[in-house]
Amino acid sequence: MKTEIKTAAIFGIVIVGIIASLSIVFSSLETSNLISDTLDEKKIPISGIELNIDKSRFKTAPDLVGIAHYINTTPEKLAKEIEGKVVLYDIWTYSCINCIRTLPYITAWNEKYSDEGLLIIGVHSPEFEFEKDPNNVEMAVQKNGINYPVVLDNEMKTWKAFENRYWPRKYIADHEGYIRYDHIGEGKYDETEKVIQELLEERATQLGLNVAAAESILELEEFEHTSFRTPELYFGYKFSAGRNQLGNTEGFNPENNVAYTIPDDLKLHYFYIDGVWKNLQGSMKLVSEEGRILLPYFAKEVNIVTKGKAELTILLDGNLISPEVAGMDVTLGKIQVVEPRLYNIVTSEEAESHTLEIQVPESGFEIYTFTFG
């Protein structure tokens, strides 16, 4: 091979080598950028927290609208408190037994996490007229040890803004206002608290705050429902459509006084009344000087929602109720009704079948519902 040709060949090989090397370098840089882009697209969590979450699939929490009264806060203070907080909206009403059972958890979460950025707002959306009275709600707030803000949603406008249909219901919004969790009814307390912890950690990370390790979950005794039990029973004709459990042959007669007589044959899960009672939208009110209510039921817990002052005598299967199964509001077989609220009549360890009798010695007593556990 001639020297000129040989030299040219060697030079060509060197040029090809340089070009190949540069291609590898640029290819590596391009691949590195692609990996970086891919990581951004997948929003890889840092320390278990997603910093760039696509929140387009989440709804934002609606404004609190139509509020009639504020407890433990003012409109101005609450508006400032919501900003940048993880907010748990608890939709409840104070005579609802399912709501009452959740309160020990909610008040404990308030005490445990309020300093870390959690704000709890009790949205009190009433089922009955007497629950619209601020004095009644304030008594319930004090009784249940509620220190967080409670707003009275008397016209159910905030309830509707959340598109809600249930008591109780919990929505949790992150510090940017997006609803990240939604739970209906009782239970799932561990799951709910873990969501609170995760959203507080996410908030702290995004705001550059010190991120504390997740704390342990609360250990409270949870009420265990009877799988098969008597359903909730309503005395108001407005609520009876599709779930009429009044066993008297006289039936409902809206806005009229009706003389009721208890029949000989009683059916399980039906209530029976004796005396003259006025049929109201949400309740029945005793008009005669005395009256009785009979209820064959199956459950381990029985409660009533009532209004009007009265001393009720409680019988179980024809005998004065025993202290072993008497509810927390029963003393020596009697209940003193002094304020409109839920009263616990029966509390037993196991679900059992009994016939409950409530003797009402004076007119003016008003009853709304039976609830069971």
Image (cartoon, rainbow, N blue to C red):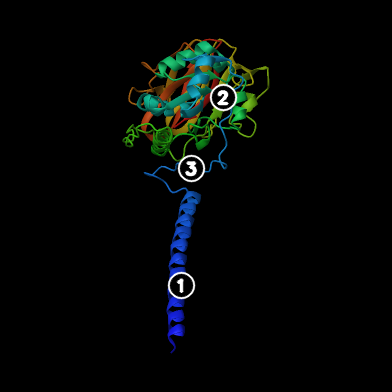
Q: Nearer the viewer, residue 186 or 109?
A: 109
Near mark 2 (Cα within 10 A), the count class, few <14, some 14-19 or many ≥20, is: some
Instruction: Indicate the amino acid at tag 2.
Output: Ile
On the image, which quarter does residue 331 sit in?
top left
The residue that label 3 is drawn on is 52
Q: Quadrant of the N terminus?
A: bottom left
Q: Is residue 250 visible?
A: no
- Select label 2 or label 3 by which is in front: 3
Q: Crowding near pointer 1: few (<14 within 10 Å), some, many (20+)?
A: few
Element marked by disc 1: helix
Q: Which of the marked residues, 2 or 3, is nearer the chain's N terminus?
A: 3
Q: Disc 3 versus disc 1: distance between alpha carbons?
A: 46 Å
The image position of residue 357, as x and y in percent, is 47, 23
Gap between marks 2 and 3, in whole Å?
A: 66 Å
Label 2 sits on residue: 262
Which circle's residue, 2 or 1, is located before the other in the chain?
1
The residue lying toward the viewer, choosing from 38 and 187, is 38
Give the labeled residue for mark 1.
Answer: 15
Q: How far apart are the alpha carbons under marks 2 and 1? A: 108 Å
Circles 3, 1 touching at the beta carbon (< 8 Å): no
Q: Residue at x 47, y 63 (%)?
A: 27
Q: Position of residue 128 (x, y in %)?
A: 58, 20
